[in-house]
Image: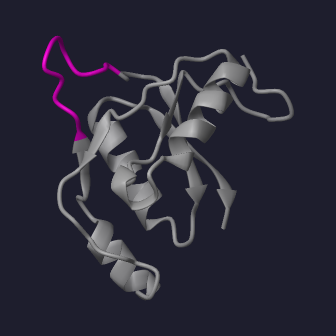
Amino acid sequence: MPVPGSRGPRPARALEAPRPLLVRGYNQAELLAEQVARRLRRPHLPRILRRLRATGKQAFLTRESRIANSAGLFAPVRPVFGPAPDLSGRSVLLVDDVVTTGATASACAAALRRLGAKDVVVLAVGR
């Protein structure tokens, strides 16, 4: 089913890009993803990706450095009980607050594809 105002199919899931919660005390991408999922009447899958290593601030890095820094940065969370979410053949909407170079979004998309996601669409509020 198409998203109102779009040309494509509705995403099967909405989730946020992982972000260190301790930095801000809250995760604005998660709050955005919750509202988007509610509005689209789709499941919200919070925290299904985990950061594998600390990268430090990327604000002052070049585009190439950000891409290299983000490669292989995320992996699916291993649930304590039950299997990892099966995204086989699904379209996923990845919600983030800001996308600058797309390095983090690309790294997240790669991890989501390892869970079987067919398409990963990124929605960001700012650039």
| Furthest residue in direction left, as rendered | 80
Which part of the image, by quadrant, shows the C terminus? bottom right
Residue 80 on the magenta segment: yes
Q: Could you say which is closer to the camera, residue 5 or residue 26?
A: 26
Image quarter for residue 118?
top left
| Furthest residue in direction front, as rendered | 25
Image quarter for residue 116?
top left
Image quarter for residue 2?
top right
What secondary structure is the magenta-colored segment mainly?
A: loop
What x and y, as percent, mark residue 55?
26, 71
Determine the residue positioned at 42% across, 22% down: 89
Residue 119 on the magenta segment: no
Q: Could you say which is closer to the camera, residue 32 or residue 115?
A: 32
Q: Is residue 122 left or right of residue 61?
A: right
What x and y, as percent, mark residue 92?
51, 32
What x and y, as percent, mark residue 15?
49, 34
Determine the residue positioned at 46% across, 81% down: 59
Q: Could you say which is closer to the camera, residue 84 or residue 116?
A: 84
Determine the residue positioned at 68% across, 25% down: 9
Q: Is residue 30 left or right of residue 52?
A: right
In the image, the segment drawn in magenta is 76-86
Coloration mode? one colour
What x and y, as percent, mark residue 36?
66, 31
Q: Is residue 11 above or below residue 124?
A: above
Q: Is residue 49 left or right of residue 105?
A: left
Number of callouts: 0
Which part of the image, by quadrant, shows the N terminus? top right
| Furthest residue in direction top, as rendered | 82
